[in-house]
Image (spheres, helix red, strand yellow):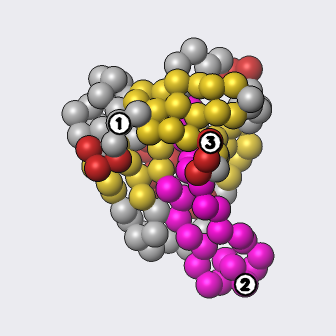
């Protein structure tokens, strides 16, 4: 596993992940599409917050179960806690993910063009 260093635009929000990034998730939900976010999911034990989470702002929308953390200075969102599946989504077989979605555009020295993208139809999920 490799250690990747990440930060927001101004550098006030910093983090590290320990992972082999082998693909990017490109979601078409309204917020990811507008942000241009490319995500990679990591488990709780694979991310280290170098900036305390209580120094960041949190945005919640839709079901209110997702938490998008962003820098209060530059406004960039480096990571988020994905939303919990609704009852209907759970009944359809969707499992809850307990980790973090990291915005790989915030990771230093990562060649985004060399990684395959997986399309996520977030626009079809219940919000």
Give the mark nearer the N terminus: 3 vs 1: 3
Q: Position of residue 126 (x, y in %)?
A: 56, 73
Give the mark nearer the N terminus: 1 vs 2: 1
Q: Where 33 falls versus 96 (above or below)?
A: above
Q: Nearer the viewer, mark 2 or mark 3?
A: 3
Q: Which mark is residue 46?
A: 3
Give the mark nearer the N terminus: 2 vs 3: 3
Q: Nearer the viewer, residue 12 or 73?
A: 12
Q: Position of residue 50 (x, y in %)?
A: 41, 33
Q: Position of residue 33 (x, y in %)?
A: 51, 46
Q: CA distance from mark 3 to mark 1?
A: 15 Å
Query: How many residues crowd around disc 2 within 10 Å: few (fewer than 14), some, or many (20 or more)?
Result: few
Q: Which residues are magenta?
A: 81-105
> Residue drawn 60% across and 73% down?
85
Q: CA distance from mark 2 to mark 3?
A: 29 Å
User: Is mark 1 in CB contact (under 8 Å) with mark 2?
Assistant: no
């Amino acid at each position: 596993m490799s250690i990747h260093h990440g930060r927001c635009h101004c550098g006030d929000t910093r983090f590290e992940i320990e992972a082999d990034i082998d693909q990017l998730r490109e979601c078409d939900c309204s917020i990811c599409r507008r942000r241009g976010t490319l995500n990679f999911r990591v488990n709780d034990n694979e991310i280290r917050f170098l900036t305390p989470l209580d120094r960041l702002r949190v945005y919640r929308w839709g079901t209110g179960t997702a938490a998008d953390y962003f820098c209060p200075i530059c406004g960039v969102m480096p990571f988020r806690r994905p939303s919990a599946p609704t009852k209907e989504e759970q009944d359809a077989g969707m499992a809850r993910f307990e980790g973090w979605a990291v915005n790989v555009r915030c990771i230093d020295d990562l060649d985004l063009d060399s990684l395959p993208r997986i399309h996520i139809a977030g626009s079809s999920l219940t919000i």
